[in-house]
Each structure stands twice: as C-alpha cells, then as structure tokens.
Image: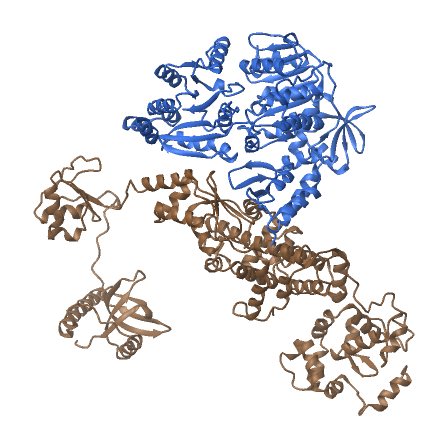
Chain colours: A blue, B brown
Amino acid sequence: MNEGPLIVQSDKTLLLEADHLLADQCRHEIAPFAELERAPEHIHTYRLTPLGLWNARAAGHDAEGVIDVLLRYSRYPVPHALLIDVAETMDRYGRLQLRKHPAHGLVLHAFDTAVLEEVLRSKKVEPLVGARIDKDSVVVHPSERGHLKQVLLKLGWPADDVAGYVDGEAHPIALVEDGWAMRDYQRQAAQGFWDGGSGVVVLPCGAGKTIVGAAAMAIAQATTLILVTNTVAARQWRDELLRRTTLTEDEIGEYSGARKEIRPVTIATYQVMTTKRKGVYNHLELFDARDWGLIVYDEVHLLPAPIFRFTADIQARRRLGLTATLVREDGREGDVFSLIGPKRYDAPWKDIEHQGYIAPADCVEVRVTLDDRERLLYATAEPEDRYRLAASSDRKTRVVDALLRRHADEQVLVIGQYLDQLHELAEHLDAAVITGETTVKARQELFEQFRTGEVRVLVVSKVANFSVDLPEASVAIQVSGSFGSRQEEAQRLGRVLRPKADGRTARFYAVVARDTVDADFAAHRQRFLAEQGYAYRIVDADEILAGDTD
Amino acid sequence: MAGSTPLGRDSSSDGARKVRSLTEDLRQRDDIQLAALLRARTDLLHPVPAGFGALANRATTVRSLTEVLDGLDLWSLQVLQAYAALDGPAAPVELAARLPGVERGDLETAAALLHERALLWDGPQEYRVVNAVRQLLGGAAPVRGAAAEPLAHPQPHPPAVGAVASEPPARVARHAGGQAASFVRNATDLLTAWSSAPPRRLRAGGLGVRDLARTATALGQDQQVTALLVEVVNAAQLLGNEVGSAAAWCPTPRFDTWRTLPLAEQWAELARAWFEMAAVPALLGTEPRPNLLTWDVRRAGATDVRRAVLEALRRLPEGTAPDREQLAAHLAWHHPRRESALQRLLYDATLDEAELLGVTGLGALADTGRALLTTDPRQEAGADPVGAALVRAVEPLLPVPVDHVLLQADGTAVAPGPLVPDLAADLALLADVESTGGATVYRFTETSVRRALDAGWSAARVLAVLRERSRTPVPQPLEYLVTDLGNRHGRVRVGPAASYVRCDDPGTVASLLADRATRALGLVRIADTVLVSAAAPSLLMSTLREGGYLPAEESTDGVPVAQRPAAHRSPLRGVPGAAPAEPGPPAGEVVDAAVRALRAGDVTVGERITGGSGGSGRLPRSTSSETLAVLHDAVAAEQEVWIGYADRAGLTTERVVEPLRLEAGFLTAYDVRTAQVRTFTLARITAVLPITTR
C-alpha cells in the first residue's frame, strides 16, 4: 500500500503527517487549495472548503490538478464522492465573470447560460443587474459590483472579477532598504497580492505585515488609504512608512479622532470611520475624498460591518487585507472573500518561527485555585457575573507577583480585561497602567519608555491587543480576556513574538482560575494557538509560588 | 416435405425412426440431453412429469414458454423467429436467406440450443418450431419455404462493450478496497446513529423522506448513498423495527455481533446482502417517489440484473471500466425480452452501487466482485465456503488495521488507519470522534474522559493505555486533564437511601449499628453520626422503637415532625358522594360457595397438617404430566382440587377449584373462593393436589 503522508477524510479534512519524508513537498502542493485548520506537532489538519477551492481557482489551479495532488499523496484511497465534490465545486467558480464591456460598461458574463438563468431568477440578484444584453450577459450597475459578488457567492456561483481596477491618482513611493532587507515571504506576499488584483495576506503577528503593505504601495505607485484599528497603530504605521519608504511626513496624513488630515497616503482608524453623527457615517466619505489607487485594511478579521458595506461600493479600487488569522468570531469569512478578495498569501506561524523571523514562544497556563470565600461567591453568583468573578480572583495577584520575580530582568506586559482588576494590579505592582482612558500622548510616552527599558512592567487593557510594536517585550502575563476569543489570544501572543536581540524564547503566561468558566474560556482561546503548533503547558499556581520561595 | 433440401432428406432417411411430435422427440433424447433440458428449464421439474407426454405438455404451456423465452438472448430469438416464420422442417443453413450475412456455425449453434430447450423439435439436421411458440411470438402466418422477408439486423454476437478507461488491476483493487472500507464505516455510523435516535416507522411502513434527508446530512453523504446503506443493512438483517405504537427503525441484536467481526467479514455480509436483495434504492428518485424500506422499492428481477451486470463486467478484459451505453446494449442483447426503462435504471443503479460497495473499483470489476459472482443465491448465507471466499477476496484490499494512535497537544488523537478492535473500543470510551475516513481523529474532552472514569477506569489506567498505545509522548495538557479529573472524580459520592438516622453521639450510632434488632434494616454508616437505610422512615421508626430507642422523626429540612397518636384518616379521594345502596341479602349460590370455600380452606389446613410437607406450607411442585393426570381424574370424578397458580407477575397463589373442562392448554374450573367460573392457563399451574379427605 502506498505510504503517502496524507490521509483524506470523508468529512473533507486532510491529515498531513508532519514528520513524513514527503510532508514538506506535500504541504506546498496542498496549501493553494486547502486551508490549514490546525498544526499541532504530529498531524496537521487541512480542510477543503468551497472558499479554499475557489481561492485556488482564482489563483489558476484546476480541479484535475487538485485531484491529482490528493491521489498522489494520499495513503488510502480517496473517497470517490469527495473527488466528485471537489471537481463540481471548483467548476462553479468562473462560470460567471464580471468584466468590462466596450459599450455597456460593467457586465456579468456567463460561460454557461443555464447558470446565468439560475442566478437571474434569484430575487436577491434581480435589483443588482440591469438589462440583458444577449443570452450570456447582463448589465451590472457599477455601484453593485461588490453586492453582486456577495450574493453570487452565497448562491454558490462565485464570480471571477476581471473588470479591473482604476489606477487611482499616481504617487511615487519606493522602498528604502538601508540597514534592512525585505524578507522573501514578504516579497512573495506583496507580489502575490498584486498579481491577484485584490485579496488578503495572512501572516503571524510580528512577521512584518506593515512591510508587506509598504511593498504593495511601492508596486502600486499610487495614493493609498490605510485603515487600522486605533490611533496608536496609526502612528506606528506612519513611523514605519517613514523609516521604510521614500515617503516624507508631509505626504502621510492621519485621519483619526484627533486629526483629520487627507494626504496622498492617509491612515485612518476603524473607530473614526464608523463614528455616526445623527445616524450617518459621515466619515465614510473619506473613501471618495481622493482617487485612491490602493486601500489597505490592517487586521482585516476585525473589519467592522459599516466598512464592509462601504467596501462593497468601491470594488473598482485595489484592496489589500492584512491579518494574522482569517478566523472571525462573527463568521463573516465569506464577506472577506467576496469584498476584500481571496487569500493571496499564507504562511504557518511555525514556518516563520523556524526561519527566525519571529521569536519562539513558550506558552504556559497557570492554574490557580480559588480560596473558599471566592468559591462560595462564585457558586452563588449569577451566570453573567461568573466569568468576571473567576477572572479577577485575588489569587491571581500572588501568581503575577511570583512570575514577575521569576523574570526580574525582562520586559513584562500584564494584560487583562477588567479595569478594576488592572488598576488594583498596577497599584500592587507599582507599575504604570494603560487602558482606553489613557490619552494617546500618555500611551505613546509609556510605550516609548517601555521600549527603552525605563519602564519594565506595563499593565495594559485590550487597547494593546493590536498593532502595538513593543519589540523588547519578552514576557506576557494574561490575567483575563474577552471570554473565549481565539483571535485575541493570538494577538496577545503576537505582542511578545517580535524576534529578540539575543534570540531569547518569549514567554506567554495565562493565569486561569481552575474549575470555573475562566478555565473553559481559556481552553477555547488556546485552541487557535494549539492548532498553530503552540503547545500550552499547564502548571499549578503552587508550583510557581513554591519555585518562588527557593 | 415441403422446402426440404437434399440434406434434410438425407437426415430423415438416416434417422432410425420418424419423429412425429415433440413428445417423440423428447422420448428419443438420451439422458444427457434430457438433463440439459431440465437444467435449463427448471420449472419442468416441479413436479416431475409422469411421462414424456406430460413433459411435452408442460413444456408447451404459455407460462413455461414465457419463462424460457425471457431467458433467451437476441440471436436465439432471431433464429427462433425465423423458424416460426417457416411452415415446415428446415435445416439451419436454410435460414441464411432470412438472416443474411450470418455464418452457418452461428445458425447451427443457435438451432442446437433452441432444440435443447425444446423450442424446436425434430432434427438434428432439420428442425421444426413448437407450435405453441409460434403463437406466443405472435408472428404472421407461416410462410412456405425460405421466401420470407430477410431480417434487417441479425445479431449473432452481442455488441462489443468499449472501455471508457482501462485501469491497472492494482489501482482497481486499491480503489475497491477503499470503498469497501468506507462502506462498512458508513454502515456502522448509520446504525450507531439510529441506535441513539431511531427514526420513526411510517404508518404505511417504510422510512420517511425527511428522516432519510436528516440521516444523510448527519452522515455527510448524499441521499442516494444513504438510501443504499439503509437498504443494505436492512437486507443484512442488521436493521429492524420495533412493533407497537412507537414503531421505529433501529439496529437488531445482530448488529452487536456484526460490529465485532473483522472488517473483511463485516464487508462480506453487507456485500452478499446487497447482491441478493430485492430492494432497488435507486427507485427513490423516480415517480411516484416511493418510500425506502417498503415493497414499493423492491423489484423481483433486481438480483438477476445485478448478477447479469457483474457477469458482463467479468467478460471484459481485466481493469476495463465499460461505457455504460454500450454495456446496456450488451446486456439488452442477452435478455432482449426483459428490456424496459426499469431495466436500464437497474443497470445504472447496479454499476453505481457496485462502485460504492467496492465490488468494482474505478468502474472495473475487482476481485471482490469476482468472488461475489461465485456465490450461490440458493445457498444459505453464513456457514458457507463462498462467504469465506468473499472474505479472502476483500481482505488484501482493505487497509491494514493499526494498533497505535498519535497523541497531540491540542487534545486530539489521530489513528492513522482503521484501529484494531480492542483499541477502537477503548478510544470510543475515552474520546469523542471528530473526523472519520481513512484515519480517525479523536478528541479528548473533560466529558469524554469523565465517561471513562464513570465506566470504572482509573486515571492511572487511562494514562497507561494512552502511553502504551501512542507512538508519541502523552502531551502534558492531556496528562494534566486526566490526572486532574481522576483526582476530582468521585469526590462527591451519591448513593441510594430511603431514610437516615442521625445522632450527635457516635457511641449511640455505633450501638445502633451493632444492635441485633436493627439488623433487618440494613443500616450503613456514612459518617460518625449518620446512618442510612433502604427501609422506609416509618419502618425505621417502628423498628427502633421496638428496639427500645426513642427516635424522633424529622422532615426533609430537619424540623422535628410531631407524631400524632395513631388515629388514621382516609384521604378524601375515592369517597362516593351519595351513600351506597344497602346490599341485599346474599344470593343462595354465593352462600353455598362461601361454605364450600370455607370447607376447602379447612380441608387444606387439614392437608397441610396431615401432608407433613416439611412445615413450609407450600404446595409441592408437580410436573406437568402429573398436573394433567390429576386434573383429568378430577374432571372425571367431579372432584375438587387444590392448585398453586402463578399470576402474570410470577406470584403464586393457592386456590381450591372444581375442574369442569380441560382443553387446549386451559383448565376451566369453578373457583370456590371467588365463586366464579374462570379459565386457568395450564402452564401456570405450578402444583395440583386432589382433595380426597372430604
């Protein structure tokens, strides 16, 4: 029997034996069409999904190739039904095409009249299209290009968008590679995006997504709108662009709560874009303020709904999504596919770690036991209060103390969800605290002091989840989180993954109250990282405290 | 004879005797020829005809002829039709005019076969058609000589079957093996799912469309595949339905033994069931949309078609996946009279089903299919060498069972192939299945590990099994989970108790426990100051009082319950509104009966005393023949007897009865105590003793 590295399951998952001789070769061949679901140490799980198969079609792979790869690497016979399903699914992509017509403008063209008939019968498609030109094409209102793509995807006939993009207002941008060099995967990611037109690049936190953005801008040579999660991230983008490209301060504008600058390169926050005044999102006009040649969405998995809606209207502009994970807690992965674009580049975290671009990490879950008083409180608490009670147990403070002593000469972030808990901790540890209430200026000062080593310990709330560049943080202690959010856990680990000057291993501690919902949420949060190959060790708080005394 | 050729004339002059009828033809055949006829037309054997006349008669009935004609291939039919169009004996070569472009050999072979089947007679140089055949074929009036119009397309040979693909046998085998394994797995999944949530059986019988759709979704299969699974497990007697108001489809006890068999044997049972089942699940997609598991999806010819299709595949070069159109034409040539739309559906269904079962691989017949063709439909399934051949054929194609798993830090275990049965059973207990296919992915959760602990496993045993069976080290989080659950499991203990005794003084508790008077209460000490008992609180109270203790009763929340002196009150329920009518004077027979009952009681007491049956007071058990004999005598003598009678619950009561009638397993007797005539089931009469002392 063929001893291939791959086992194809009937539920459309692919199991790849990581230690197999052919594993790497196989991984490269299946990566274009299968989505990595989890990558623990021995067997990696990939999943065949319609989105994944369509991503592959969009990248020019055909069903025969996919089936050939499956048959070639599979250890056991591949279920017949699965092969048929792959062929049928892939065949659905590109039967419809959005293209430019010399006389009618944007049209939906079908290579299969029956498919066109089928989708035109849908009530959802009807308002989005205009007159029928001939039996195979129908006029599409240019403003409905995005909506139509969303609807067609839901109908299972994703359209191939070859209508092209507006070039936008030209603006010279070039990378300045002095003292640093673009990494291979960053170059591939930027090029992959550009060749695909629009789409999403998936890279772990700390792998230099900003540089991928800068590289894409350098290829586009056009005015760019960058959407980021918050003001601190906006400033970091600006600093990074100033450092890595020919752009000058005058060319980069910040569009946030504090400032409203519109420049050839404008960095705006999701927050300001989604601020409503009198029920109207009046800042969304920024999308039309200039003839943007490129729109970059940072942390695309957090993209708020109004931005999705507006993005549907600007399908003629090139869009680049950057993210560490396509996991959306709200399950809108399909909208990312149809509105931002297919996944254009993806690299597993561990691969990049092996290349030395992100620090290796040791994840530890520390379990504390509630004392009798807390246990009683917990047992009698209303269900909605239970997580808060368990998460902000006083017992955690002692553990944080001990951990801080253990890492006495390292830069430590203490991350939590509840402000009371954070303030108490900060007071107890005599450390500075950053929350949503802290002014941007104060935040930046504190971050700077932390970077230089003046401040050793920072207590931060979820404002620091994203896009805060703190290269020297090597230890993170998480005392509470947003319930079971998997992407938050990934982001928080990302805070300590920037490669360290001395190649040190980063430490990520999650302090969890045992036998409570806190532990359940922790287990859920950890799944993403466990699936990415980060194994958690579990230790009892007593061990940490005992280690402290000797 | 008209139209006879010199050759024909030669033959008749050479023949020992002139054959004048079919009967005579049959009489002249030798034993081998007769045996061939009876083998080809088995209906003639039942019953064995009395003589050649009877045989000829039977062979020319419409019913028998229809059957034999239906079994003929196109060429034989064409030759037969050509003969039917002639009015006299003719040599096969004479048909060449009517069947142009055909070789003489083909004509002779066909004529010989038709003669063997007693559709032609006379011969062997010249043949005549049996008259009844001519009528049955409904041909025009016979034409003299060879002047008949030539037939447009004589087809002495079946149309060739082209290949859409030719696969190397190794690939065919591999593919068939994969399908075979997944078919068994799907069948197991289906039956397991229906074990816990059996779908309802429709009032008209069968399985509802919605239940089928739901099951298909649950299995992740399409409906057609699911329908096949359902019918095959039903045919294999792994599925049945409970009768009664809540009739539902669920696995039979056979499923429990079947699932422990090796994979190859499991498959062999399913494959055989499929090959021999009358159900055609593909009919589900046709109007008028019948329900599964009903007679509406059964077709008498289904088995024959499956065999015919597989036979046709076997005739192709090895590894050939046939062109379906051509295969259908080929099969139609073999049985032209059976051809219909249904037939075509059956061909396609058989090819689809064969692929799903692993009887074919990539469209070409696999060794499994070849083995299936050696099965004899008339042979009882089970203890037969053919089943063994089937198992032997499928075994090398199936993936080799593995005896290990790979444990991973994300809480999963991957079995990289089908597991050996004992490990599969262990894992089914320890973890939940997350994904099936060539491999199985299990996930360990708190619930799944607790399930094992509940089943009596210790944490140490769980870890030992994991360590022994995992190729990879047990990940720390899993080890922690198991150890942690092991420590916590059973910390809170639950047990049954109907009452408790508590007392602040452990000394008193200890003495209570030791007291002989309380032994019957089954007191158990669960703490220094607490005892529990399975006895009701009232019994506990009274026993303790009798033992000289001074118990106080308390309610569930610990408040003492004041004991009222025993002044019982009836609950309101059941009290009639109006006063009941005065009972009249008792009827004479009631009184008589009462007297008799009293006497009988007296008699029994006397018996007990004088019988000296060990003082237990119970009637000695009688054997059934004794019982019968005594009752017979009692009926004859009109004598009362004393019987022990077990009720439905198995409780034995003793009665005195006057037997009246004894028949068909029942005793009709007058029951003296209840003063009624009633029927007793003989089987439940445990003992009988004549009352003789009166």
Q: How many marks?
A: 0
Q: Quadrant of residue B271?
A: bottom right
Left or right: where does residue B506 sit relative to residue A237? left
What x and y, as percent, mark residue B62? Answer: 72, 74
Q: Nearer the viewer, residue A194 or A83?
A: A194
Residue A287, above or below A509: above
Left or right: where does residue B20 sit relative to residue B562? right
What x and y, as percent, mark residue B632? Answer: 30, 78
What x and y, as percent, mark residue B375? Answer: 61, 68
Q: Nearer the viewer, residue B214 or A398?
A: A398
> Can see residue A313?
no
Q: Quadrant of residue B352?
A: bottom right
Residue most extreme to the left? B548
Q: Nearer the viewer, residue B390 or B127?
A: B390
What x and y, as percent, mark residue A104? Answer: 81, 24
> Can see residue B192?
yes
Q: Quadrant of the N terminus of chain B?
A: bottom right
Q: Quadrant of the C terminus of chain B?
A: bottom left
Residue B184, above or below A204: below
Left or right: where does residue B538 sit relative to residue A278? left
